[in-house]
Amino acid sequence: MPRTRQAIAALPDLSGIRLACNMHLDLKMAPLVEGLLSRGCEVFLTTCNPTTVQNDVVNYLVEKGATAKAWRDMSNEEWSASFDDALVWQPTHLCEMGADLTTRLHENVALGKSVSTIAASLEATGSGINRLKGMKPQYPIYNWDDLPVKEGLHNRHMVGLSAWQTFFQTTHLTLHEKVVVVIGYGLVGQGVAASARAFGAQVQVAELDAARALQAKYDGWPVVDLHDAVKTADVVATATGASDVVSAKHLDNMKSGTFILNVGHVAKEIDVDYLKSNATHSEPMPYVNAYTLPDRTLYLLADGSMFNLTAGYGDSLNAFDVTLAVMAEGIGHIVGEGATSESGLYLLPEMVWKRAL
């Protein structure tokens, strides 16, 4: 990962910096964490999604000197407790995917349980940015999800490509002769739709936002009503980053044999609880969760978690090299000039992220 190595080498001495990271903990994150440790940074690792944690990676990074409270499939109670543990560790800076630590810290401050000691933070996801818009940050937070290099590379291209690669590996099926309904036409949804068509699918788009729905039509996609579209879909893919997108009513309208997958950051896009309460569960193949109702069987891939990272490997190494390099440059910014800004939400400056290219 040449860009990542170059960005890490350019970081200042990080002695005295205590960085709490809430992020996906897979193999591709190791070079960044190793690099931070080599620069003198103390690192506490929590996860933004328990289903994407690779335990061997966490163990390796702990051996290298990181502190961690994360393991694959930790319970919701354990996951929530890890946020408190990270804050008790008294970090000076945060690096997040989903704003879980910032949200917990601000809840504690509002209740008078703690005060903020954070100098500055990074946020990498649209879901996290949406959460942050509903609060008054206690410190400067830098949004790098909306950067052209993040939107155009990871969001638009890599998520869709890796999702369908994971679909092929997991189900041993292709998309030929299959109707694929993509829910959400943001940049992730655009990539999911384009990759599905490239792999032979008949693609339809369900989008509630009028402007995005119009864009989908101009891009040549049939824009459909989700309630009706699920009746004939062979594959349903959620890409919204929102909760409760596929409801019990939608699930009741799907035909037997439908595959359902989620590539959004939020693991609650699909009403998994409804299936678990009303259907018999089996796992005929790893990450293919079969839910048998009285009249049909639905296949929920990776049980509704982020499919391309739970059952697959996510971005390619060459693409993620750019992502990690931008993250490293962002960390350099928040431990330096970025920490001097007033409290608030900012876009990571162009002069910072362009150094990663």
Image (cartoon, rainbow, N blue to C red):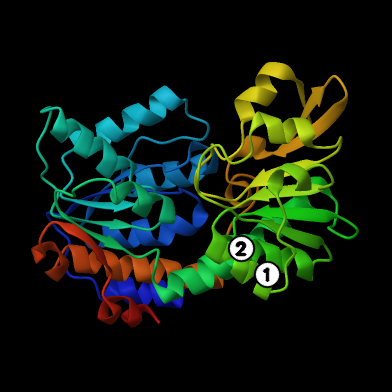
Q: Which residue is under mark 1?
A: 217
What crowding class fits label 1: few (fewer than 14 Cα within 10 Å), some (14-19), or many (20 or more)?
few
Q: Which mark is residue 184?
A: none
Residue at the (66%, 75%) spot, across then down: 218
In the visual, does 295 lie left or right of 56?
Answer: right
- Cβ–Cβ under 8 Å for marks 2 and 1: yes
- The answer to whether residue 171 is left or right of residue 342 is right
Per the image, label 2 sits on a secondary structure element best described as helix
Crowd band around label 2 with a 10 angstrom C-alpha radius: few (<14), some (14–19), many (20+): many
Image coords of residue 327 (percent x, y): 35, 65
Q: CA distance from mark 2 to mark 1?
A: 6 Å
Which SS class for mark 1? helix
Can you identify the residue that label 2 sits on?
A: 213
232 over 154 or under it: above or below: above
Measured along the vertical axis of the image, is residue 250 above or below residue 93? above
* In the displayed structure image, the side of residue 248 where residue 35 appears, left or right: left
Residue 285 occupies which quadrant of the picture? top right
